[in-house]
Amino acid sequence: MACPQCQHENPPGQKFCGECGVRLVLLCPACNTSNPPANRFCGECGARLTAAAPAAGAAAVAPPARHPMTPAERFASPGGYTPPHLANKVLSSPLAVEGERKQVTVMFTDVSGFTAMSERLDPEEVHTIMDRAFEIILGAVHGFEGTINQFLGDGVMALFGAPIAHEDHPERALRAALVVQDKLEPLRADVRRTHGLDFRMRIGINTGPVVVGAIGRDLRMDYTALGDTVNLASRLLNVAQPGQIVASRHTRELCEGFFEFEDLGEFRVKGKTDAVHAFAVRHAIGGRTRI
């Protein structure tokens, strides 16, 4: 059976693609129920799923339509949501040695008031809204060659600068965050018009060292935080107001001259002895430089 994501040909009986890890399913042509790839007949209505071999001289029967991946299936493995050109670049680039220290920029996103929204709306409505939001986030992160390291229910953890190395990874992260906020506006308007809710996303960004772990063929990356890099990015997310992008002092210093920042002052955050200085990202600064 050919994988609907990477087109890898899998032997009969497999439940997941051996190349990218996506679940293999067949869509019943009669009732549209998804079935395991080993089924010959639909478990819901009994219709035949695999066409009989055509008689000599007869036209070949088209294979049954494949069931599109659900968001849960798609987001279960990085191979399911990483664009092929970016996946090839990740897997063909020289990988860092396991245990090596690397400087990266970490971005966390989440939906402000997600719990309240989930309690008020039907699960299917929440699912539809978040599916649109994830598509926007994926497009922005991948557009600047970042990678999604984790899906967190109502947001993501993204990395810039690893495994694809970029010297300007802090700038790429901030530009991706601005794109996310900009492209979420139509979704925000739809949610307000349909459900009377204000759909806003918060974003926290920090730059610092991490220890590189393994990078599998399915694009799963194992990075261990060093020097509280990931933890601080997560804490800055909690500092951010709805619709706000908050960056650390270090990220701001690395991007000075390319963005306009608002000084938010110092905050006490969990796990940090000293106060943390935070900056809200307002917008990118236009113009041309010698670079």
Image (cartoon, rainbow, N blue to C red):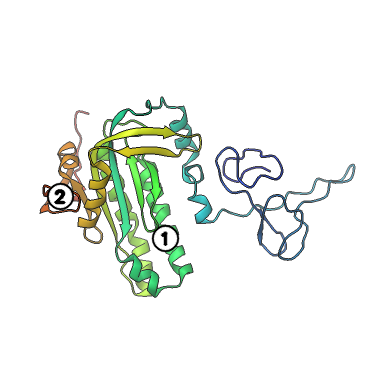
Q: Position of residue 60 (x, y in %)?
A: 80, 45
Residue shown at 75% from the left, 55% from the top:
49
Q: Would you call the spot at circle 1 few (<14 residues within 10 Å), some (14-19), or many (20 or more)?
A: some
Instruction: Tell me how many marks there are.
Output: 2
Residue at x 69%, y 65% (from the top left corner): 31
Q: Mark 2 sits on what residue? A: 278
Quadrant in which the N terminus appears = top right
Discs 1/2, front: 2
Q: Residue at x 42, y 33 (%)?
A: 214
Residue 109 at x, y = what percent? 31, 53
Q: Is residue 145 visible?
A: no
Q: Which residue is mark 1?
A: 130
- Who is closer to the viewer here, 85 or 3? 3
Q: Residue furthest right?
A: 56
Determine crowd level at label 2: few under 14, some 14-19, many 20+ residues with C-alpha closer than 10 A. Answer: many
Amino acid type, mark 2:
Ala
Q: Which SS class for mark 1?
A: helix
Tell me which amino acid carries mark 1. Met
258 lies above or below 238: above
Q: Answer left or right for 154 relative to 256.
A: right
Q: In what quadrant of the picture does the C terminus appear?
A: top left
- The location of residue 97, given as percent across then percent down, is 37, 25
Res. 19 image quadrant: top right
Q: Is 206 in front, or is 231?
A: 231
